[in-house]
Amino acid sequence: MSVVFVLIIIGILVASVFLIAFIWAVKNGQFEDSYTPSVRILFDDPISSEENDDTSEQDNKHEKKSIKS
């Protein structure tokens, strides 16, 4: 029976730690942006300059081949 009391006390301690962590996160603004995550998938990723260079090289190769043909 004493084990049950120990488990209850440990459970209360763990729950209180999570409650304190949640309150701390709310006060520090972790949950303020509720709009952006829902529409983030709709935004296009910016094209990096490295990808631009690769595509322009491929376009130049295709143009050269078409000119030779």
Image (cartoon, rainbow, N blue to C red):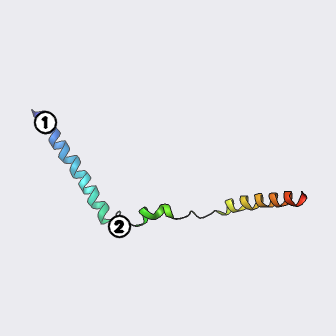
Q: Position of residue 33 (x, y in %)?
A: 38, 66
Lateral position of residue 22 relative to residue 42, left or right: left
Q: Position of residue 29 (x, y in %)?
A: 34, 66
| Mark number displayed over residue 4 | 1
The residue carrying pointer 1 sits among few (fewer than 14), some (14 to 19) or many (20 or more) residues within 10 Å by Cα, namely few
Residue type at mark 2: give it. Answer: Glu
| Mark number displayed over residue 13 | none
- Outermost residue toward the left in this view: 1
Q: Nearer the viewer, residue 44 or 2?
A: 44
Element on which disc 1 rests: helix
The picture quadrant where one finds residue 46 is bottom right
Lateral position of residue 62 relative to residue 1, left or right: right
The residue carrying pointer 2 sits among few (fewer than 14), some (14 to 19) or many (20 or more) residues within 10 Å by Cα, namely few
Q: Quadrant of the N terminus?
A: top left
- Outermost residue toward the right in this view: 68
Lateral position of residue 63 relative to residue 25, left or right: right
Residue type at mark 1: give it. Answer: Val
Structural distance between the alpha carbons of marks 1 and 2 = 40 Å
Q: Residue at x 23, y 47 (%)?
A: 14
Q: Position of residue 59 (x, y in %)?
A: 77, 60
Q: Residue at x 15, y 41 (%)?
A: 8
Q: Residue at x 14, y 34 (%)?
A: 3
Q: Residue at x 20, y 47 (%)?
A: 13
| Mark number displayed over residue 32 | 2
